Image (cartoon, rainbow, N blue to C red):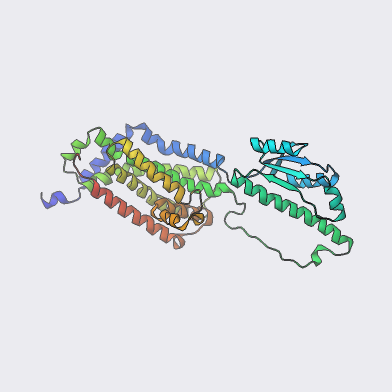
Amino acid sequence: MSSADNRFSFQRFISIIKKEFIQVKRDPISLRLPFIMPVVMMLLFGYAVNTEVDKIPTAVYDQSNTEESRAFLDKFTESDYFMVYETVQSEDRIAQLVKSGDAKAGLIIPEDYSDKVKSGSNTEIQLIIDGTEPTTARTAMSSGQLIARGFSQKYTAEKLMKYGITPDKLTGISLKTDVWFNPDMESTKFTIPGLVGLILQNVTIMLTAFALVREKERSTIEQLIVTPIKSSELILGKLIPYIVIGYSGFLFSLAMCIWVFKVGIAGSVGLLLLLGFLFVYCSLSIGMLISTFAKNQMQAMIVMVFFLLPSILLSGFIFPREAMPEAISYLGYIIPLTYFLDIIRGIALKGIGLDYLWKDTAALLGFTAVILFIATKRFRKSLD
């Protein structure tokens, strides 16, 4: 073979791109997937997946049934964390409602509540919590304690006023809190930008994971074998059409993030678009690498699931990586999505730039170069 045959040929490269565009055009699923998946996943995750718990259905057993107990119940329900599901007349009924799941909490006010409050004695109100859902249980516990503490302080202040001691004369420690980047601590502002990265990864890997596999199953790869096309020309040529489709899906997801869920981009939109393109390229390379391993579409699907599931769990999309065991959290460093989540959340929510994100960007560049190199080397123009 002459040295000219070993050189990269742009003519062959363009031919592969044209061929792949024609093949994609004949596959309506590949064209629609980057737009259907963002709509379905963002609507489901954006509205159904919500870590903010409120209006916890609560069964109330008010044995005191006095002005003081009703004042406490008013304060309890005004918080919006609790909603009176049913006012009951026995503790057994509370047990039934909590066991059935109709009520997630039960509030029991003792019979002597009013007398103890008036006399300044300590009184105890019982809050029963269904612990089968830890998020709801933690919210119910912390909110209930906060409400009870605030109500207790109100009565303490009234008692002190009788003796001429005003609350402002008492020595105490105050804690001033200042929440940055997401002042209202809305879960959607954390979930939706991450979901853009997750959708982008899933769509692009899915598109290219079947690229070479389809050639093998349809035996059209035999036609490529007898041509002088090089591995790099074939791999890169097949990537270009899917880069266009995948990046279009990214732009569509980003538009939904901004206009449907009202999650603005605090930082540079241009930088986000540029690094989004890099992540598209990286994810497509992963899909192409999978297609070089798989012999058929079923194998490609299995390998893809084995990759996508850990990336959802270990990248920090749902669970904070800081809360994971150290050995498990290290696995997140070998997942490209981990770095893009830092990028998109950093730009969208914090408004930071490349001076803070250069490490994540360098990691994505490294992953893309290595994965694409391995995919190119693994491809062999043979039927094996």
- What number of labels is visible? 0
**What residue occupies the far left of the structure in this picture?**
1
Q: Residue at x 86, y 61 (%)?
A: 161
Q: Residue at x 58, y 53 (%)?
A: 182
Q: In this view of the protein, which residue sits in the foreground, 118 or 343?
A: 118
Q: Is residue 282 left or right of residue 48?
A: left
Quadrant containing the C terminus in the rendered view: top left
Q: Quadrant of residue 37?
A: top left
> What x and y, as percent, mark residue 169?
81, 67
Q: Is residue 295 left or right of residue 41?
A: left
Q: Is residue 259 left or right of residue 217?
A: right
> Can the viewer see residue 85?
no
Q: In this view of the protein, which residue sits in the foreground, 275 or 376?
A: 376
Q: Is residue 269 left or right of residue 286?
A: right
> What x and y, as percent, mark residue 91?
74, 39
Q: In this view of the protein, which residue sits in the foreground, 223 or 243?
A: 223
Q: Residue at x 51, y 53 (%)?
A: 320
Q: Quadrant of residue 153?
A: bottom right
> What x and y, as percent, mark residue 286?
34, 47
> What x and y, as percent, mark residue 79?
71, 47
Q: Residue at x 38, y 57 (%)?
A: 363
> Can the viewer see residue 175?
yes
Q: In this view of the protein, which residue sits in the foreground, 42 or 275?
A: 42
